[in-house]
Image (cartoon, rainbow, N blue to C red):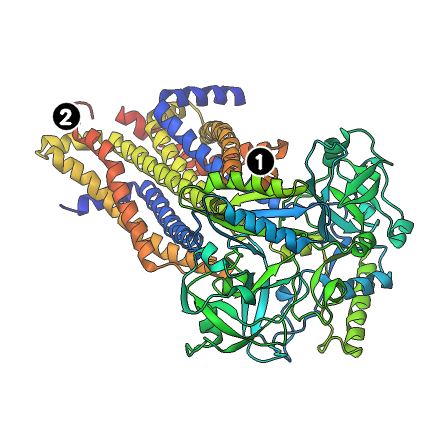
Amino acid sequence: MFSYYLNLALRSLKRNVVLTMLMIAAIGVGIGASMTTLTIFRAMAADPIPNKSRQLFAVQIDNWGPSKSGVQTPDDKLQQQVSYTDAMGLMNAHAALRQTVMYSTGFALSPPNPNLRPFQVPARATYMDFFPMFEVPFRFGTPWTREDDEGRAPVAVISRELNDKVFGGANSVGKTLNLDKHDYRVVGVLDRWQPVPKFYDLNNNQYGEIEQAFIPFTRAIENQMTTWGNNNCSRDAVAPGWEGHLHSECVWFQFWAELPTAADAERYRYVLNNYAAEQQRLGRFHWAAHTRLRDVREWLADQHVVTDEARILVLVSFSFLLVCLLNAMGLMLAKIMGRAGDIGVRRALGANRRAIFGQCLIEAGVIGFAGGLVGLALTAAGLLGLRALLSEQTTRLTHLGFWEVGITVGTAVIATTLAGLYPTWRAAHIQPAWQLKAQ
Amino acid sequence: MELRPILSAMRRNKFGALLIATQMAVTLAFLANALTLVEQRIAWSDRPTGMAEADAFVVHTETVDHPDDLAARQERDIAGLRALPGVVDAYTTDMYPLEGGGWTETVNLTPDQKTPTAFASHYMGDEHALHTLGLKLIAGRNFSADEIANRTDNDVPRTSGYIVTKSLAAKLFPNGDALGKPIFVETNNPAPIIGIVDRLQGPFTIATGLFSTFAENSVLSPYRLIGESSVYMVRAQPGQRDAVMKSAEAKLFALDENRILKFRSMQEVRADAYRGEHGLIVLLSAICIALLIVTAFGIIGLTSYWVAQRRQQIGIRRALGATRQAIVRYFQTENFMIAAAGAAVGIAFAIALNLWMVRSFEMVRMDSSRALVGALVILVLGQFAVIWPALRAASIPPALATRGG
């Protein structure tokens, strides 16, 4: 029965090509626009580390105090980063399964080949826990050791990209890299790794590439490497120079903790609060302890990783899809009512209402499917257009995978069939006698 | 024109008329809000920085050798740049407008103040800064050469005075007597405001949040920032920017080969800074146009269907003496009535949508005239879309009335 109805639907669509094309185009354009924005939105709102997003926590501590005395700093105005004093205080507390303080920095790399000019290498100073915590894949070698962290060892883990560039993709473990005129021993080379968004440090470029080199935090501090990320200060440094800046209330470090269970997280909240209360007792904070522990999802929501623009665009394109569907609905109604005579004859020859209903609904489904295919092509074109229009960083958001294709065509078929319900219902209620008489 | 027959015909095609009206209402609501959003973004991204952008470029330079004579090298670089043919002026800065991020300070009127009087972007520069940037000094004086001190990120030498923007001056001293008044920037050592410039935008470009609240508040202090990496701002003679960028690169590499250089014209900087805004504007406009086209085709499709359905009646009307114009006018009036109903609902919908968006997103209130513009657009669109089917209807021969039925 289905194939017969399908056949009928195709015939009927061929009978009025202009109307059919209009319907398919309307649905295609609507689906194309909404799926383009939805693809971007889904990528923005994606969980960058689904296995562990409920176990990794970003730490925030109010070390600046409220702007008005007596009022607590609102949660959304809390510093995104922590100060060196607080980061070290928490590192020494050892209250989490794994924990790391880190910051974004960089080097000038002088390539072994003297004909090449030196170039900049963005780097991350962190502890070895970083790699198992964030499930970072290794191609060669391993992370550095805890002894390296304590001993401020000049070791580095480099990205696959930098390894390709400098060592031609070969296993470079054990080789030496000249970074800022210091020699670092390569202990590991990463495999491809690109969390989207780059949740562990959302400063500067949320969809940016990962750093090309990773070195022990302790080494970076010893070498007085300045931050390449955001550095925010509220009070002036008490002492001049690097030491003064390090021990000021300036915030430029990210702090993450891995807490596998809810009980661990609860316990850590307690530790965190105790730490802040202790700082108050010591006279460093003149306000009640105010700390926050947010897991990856909460962190991304709090940091507004999905921009208002993306939300507005999704809203806009779905209202556009709605208009397109209303449009197709009107055209379908016109088409079906134009065929009232046919339907009357079929009814008179014994087709019941359900049969007519089924037939017309399949016709709507066929239009939806065709519209979905057009929409798919337009989505691909739209994503290409967005790449040209928006910055480089959004490129990695514009990926059309199996799921996106399925969702696109599925939405088109379902939405069009739904829009076809009313015209179909009208068709099924055509009075055969009326139509036959009119002929 | 008699409206009653149109109304009674419409009553028999309730659903079709309702569909068109709904489509028009949604189109209008969308159009009005998109217009507001686009206007808001254009206004934000078109704000002037106050500097002469067209001929300016920045150079990021980083030394590789960790030399001890950073200040001397920088002096050599700047002298070399100033001596290049086609260069108007150059200086060392800590940041530049539209950079996206940079150095902010709190500005206070008393030492150890708990709540800051103002936030400001903190630019540094020597006596050539104003000339290089092309800023307009509206009160006081420029820095003199002997006032300029070398400094690093963390060391703050004593200073003899600051230049502030008009906007920051007004924020600090609302009575308009800012010139000569002492302010506290970075330290507990006050220094007077020695000059006021008309405008110098901060480096932040984000339209929301804390930074957007003091976009025009900047303070310029008489320092040369010395470090492993520096930023040079250079202004070329009109039209010579690209050539000067090339000769500047050659010059800087000749002075020190072992360095990393990055050149950006202010034009590129502006394009990068507002790429997101620009993308949103293009995208919204494209969707707006597509929406109007789809709505127009919807009207054409449904009206054609009505025409086909009423061939008989139209033939009879023609036979009874109705002119072609009368038939065209019938469909135009019908469309106008539907569009007017759609517009009335659409205006209400547009306002409701805007109120909701203001609450949920960082969006500005819509000017009610935008809803009226939207209404006008859909009324005109409807009239244009209906012309083709109406002409088809008018071409139905009166003889049709005698056939069939």
Q: Which residue is mark 1?
A: A407
- In the foreground, B333 or A118: A118
Taking the image as shown, residue B41 lies to the left or right of residue B328, namely right
Position of residue B21 measured from the top left corner of the image (x, y, whole percent):
33, 46
Residue A1 can be seen in this image: no
Q: What residue is drawn where x is 67% and y is 73%?
A: A65
Position of residue A204 measured from the top left corner of the image (x, y, whole percent):
62, 51
Residue sitting at the far left: B321
Position of residue B338 measured from the top left corner of the image (x, y, whole percent):
27, 46
What is the three-letter code of the residue carrying label 1? Ile
Taking the image as shown, residue B372 lies to the left or right of residue A325, namely left
- In the foreground, A250 or A383: A250
Quadrant that contains the C terminus of chain A: top left
Are there few (<14), some (14-19), or many (20+) residues within 10 Å of tag 2?
A: some
Query: Image quadrant of residue B137?
Result: bottom left
Position of residue A280 measured from the top left corner of the image (x, y, whole percent):
77, 76
Residue B143 can be seen in this image: yes
**Chain containing the residue with disc 2:** B
- Taking A16 as reference, is A141 above or below it? below
Q: Which residue is mark 2?
A: B397
Q: Secondary structure at mark 2?
A: loop
What is the three-letter code of the residue carrying label 2? Pro
Q: Are marks 2 and 1 on the same chain?
A: no
Are there few (<14), some (14-19), or many (20+) residues within 10 Å of tag 1?
A: some
